[in-house]
Amino acid sequence: MILVLEASTTSAKAMVYHPEKGTIRVLSKPYANAGEDRSLLDAGTVWRDILELGRQVVWDCKEEIELVSLCSVWHSLLLCGPDGEPCGPIYSWADVSAAETTAEIRRDREFTRLLYRCSGCMVHAMYPLYKLIHLRRQGMELGDKFAFCQGSYLFFKLTGERLTSDFIAAGTSLLDVAERRYAPRLLAMTGMAEAQFPRLCNCRETRPLREESARLLGLRAGIPVMVPGPDGGLNQVGAGALHPGEMTLSVGTSGALRVSVPRPTFSLEGGTWCYLAPDGWLCGSATASAAGCVDWLAKGVLGGRSSYAELERELTPHRGMPYFLPFINGERCPGWRDERRAVFWGLGAENGAAELYYAVLEGVLFNLFQCYEELVELCGAPDTIRVSGGICKSNFWLQMLADIWQRELVVSNNEQASMLGAAVLGMQVLGKLERLEHYRPSGDRVILPDPCMAEYYRQRFHEWSKVYQQ
């Protein structure tokens, strides 16, 4: 049995997975005391919530755990003192306080291009490299600090070792993505030494669970704990999409599209990213807010007065619908403009809550469709598109996605594709799976596009694109 622990953007999660029977038990809990935008998280809270859920699923299953596999967000930063105690909050990908710093760096186009082609990451405030540069400029003393990501901090708490996978570290913008190691030029920009960051290793490496952590989880001390993997990359593994021609499209708090590539791949204008995969590379494009925009509208604007189902029942799509630019947390791909803000455009007195809801769903997908077109231009059209994330709970939104893309979609029946990917990687470590490419999820369903909606969305996307360009 494998225990998977995930520290996501908004919640702690725990899963027990059996290599033959599949998922046995899953628990999830929103972080306590987290701000509405989730840009800053308390490390102690994340650790306690992870322990609580891990202990609960282990108790519920009453089966022997052979391995602990870790999953966390791809882009986060936590600074700790020499004793390993946090010196401040976890800065998540949603924190864009370094926007002024990145805007200044991007004014040098040639230097920006050099940074992008070295790290695979465009210059953007979500990446830890630029958070560190910004904090240093703000006067923070970094010489006595140790830098972790959310996942490597959990690994440190569980094992006592400052170690992390190159898989997740690729999301820091501190690695040479071709060489799979820290880039001295990028480290120099932070003013920190390589020894202040976790040592890099392959994503299949493990270390023994230390006694104190084992007691807190209700496990046997010494069982192997895997170095952390990134949620987005593990989503690709869990979706069974490591073969050429397969694309994953995950729409959760944020949104992302990914394809496996045999070598580092870069777009001309930097509208895509390139990170590491377990045995190669992933080329992709991502948006800062997806379902996060829907939650913002439902709770922050509409005050939770209507359910999504009630809003959908009121809807009949028509050309007079308003448009929405989904940049409540700034823009990631394709424009990488941290300072951009969300916009409703074309609102009229005749538009009510249902039309606003529709515009948000559509705007999120139009932003992702922009990313899709750029990725297709770079890597070619995929043979299969595998969809996962919170969008899978909404047939209305899934059908809109199929109609905009005019593509058949393979929809995962597992809402926790990233945790499943961590379990699959764990199976390989335990010798129960020879190659990751051999894993195929079961029970997927297919959504077909409505050809009658093709022209409607083609025109809507054309108009939305004009709003985007303003």
Image (spheres, grey):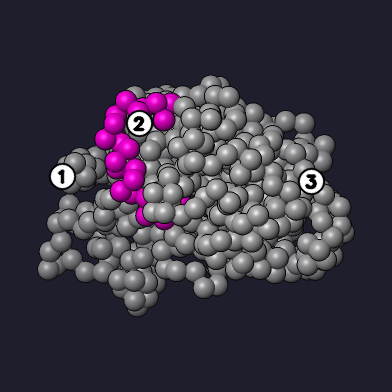
Residue 427, x across and y down, in percent: 76, 42
Dots 2 and 3: beta carbons under 8 Å?
Answer: no
Q: Nearer the viewer, residue 144 or 454?
A: 144
Q: Residues within 10 Å of mark 1 (few under 14, many from 20)?
A: few
Dots 1 and 3: beta carbons under 8 Å?
Answer: no
Q: Return the residue found at the far top.
A: 263
Q: In the rendered structure, which amino acid carries the disc numbered 1?
A: Gln
Q: Nearer the viewer, residue 201 or 446?
A: 201
Which residue is depicted at the point 61% across and 43% down? 197
Q: Is residue 467 left or right of residue 267?
A: left
Q: Which residue is mark 2?
A: 112
Which residue is depicted at the point 69% across and 44% down? 163
Which residue is depicted at the point 37% across and 72% down? 299
Q: In the rendered structure, which amino acid carries the disc numbered 3?
A: Arg
What is the quadrant of residue 238 in the picture?
top right
Q: Is residue 302 left or right of residue 275?
A: left
Per the rendering, the mark at residue 470 is 1
Q: Which residue is mark 3?
A: 207
